[in-house]
Amino acid sequence: FAIGVAGTTLELAANRAVNSYAKENFFDPLGMDASFNSGEIKDKKLIATLYNPDDSVARAASVSASFKKREIGRSSAFFAGGLTISAKDLAKLTAILANDGTYEGVRYLSEESVQIMETPCLTAVSRGHEFEQCIPLRYQTEIYGQSRLYYHLGIAYGTLSLISYNPDTRDGVVIISTGANESHDDRGIFKICGDIADYIYNS
């Protein structure tokens, strides 16, 4: 809910959509075809059909491609997620966090902004395992062979995703899946994502 309030406040104060802000400051400079409104993706052929674990269609690509622009200040439910993006482009955003706000020598976020995002606010429990909740990242130590990881989970319309990075080594892993079972591992992370992350970090 807080992310929705923040996104709505930004839109009303700037009189522009969050997606417009993201395009100007991140998506376009980074050469990304990404959007919080999937209908604005330039190459519609890249939009995937999303599946449920039983192989039924959760959302057809044609439906995602047909979404129109939302009215400014009236789309708060989407600010907590809803980003249509490829794994390659999502890795660029993850790299910005892992490198204290920079990507390929260009600064996109201040170090202070990244530090705020990495600051634990409270200890939470998921599937019996504790983690530190930051805004909006989560944080755990001794996980997947790493001394520590910041990470963020995504779930929507059959999509299960995970971004994660070690701020010490600056290594990161990005996973986007569809049609997988929503079961969690003993770390409270989607098992399909955790298994892949564990394999890559330890390869």
Image (tube, rainbow, N blue to C red):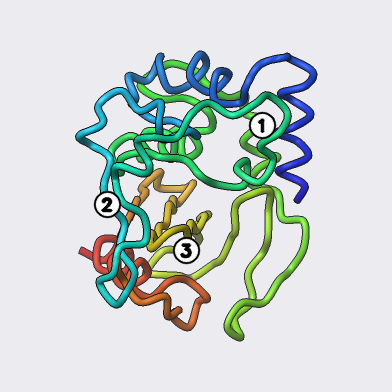
Position of residue 97 relative to residue 109, above or below, is below
Q: Amino acid at mark 3?
A: Ser
The residue identified by callout 1 is: 113
Tell me the element at label 3.
Answer: strand
Q: Is residue 177 left or right of residue 26?
A: left
Relative image position of residue 55 (x, y in whole percent): 25, 72
The label shown at residue 49 is 2
Q: Is residue 200 left or right of residue 189?
A: left
Q: Earlier in the sequence, mark 2 or mark 3?
A: 2
Position of residue 41 relative to residue 128, above or below, is above
Q: Residue at x 61, y 26 (%)?
A: 18
Q: Residue at x 66, y 37 (%)?
A: 75
Relative image position of residue 156 (x, y in whole percent): 47, 58
Q: Amino acid at mark 2?
A: Thr
Q: Earlier in the sequence, mark 1 or mark 3?
A: 1
Label 1 to label 2: alpha-carbon separation: 34 Å
Q: Earlier in the sequence, mark 1 or mark 2?
A: 2
Position of residue 2 relative to residue 192, above or below, is above
The residue identified by callout 3 is: 147
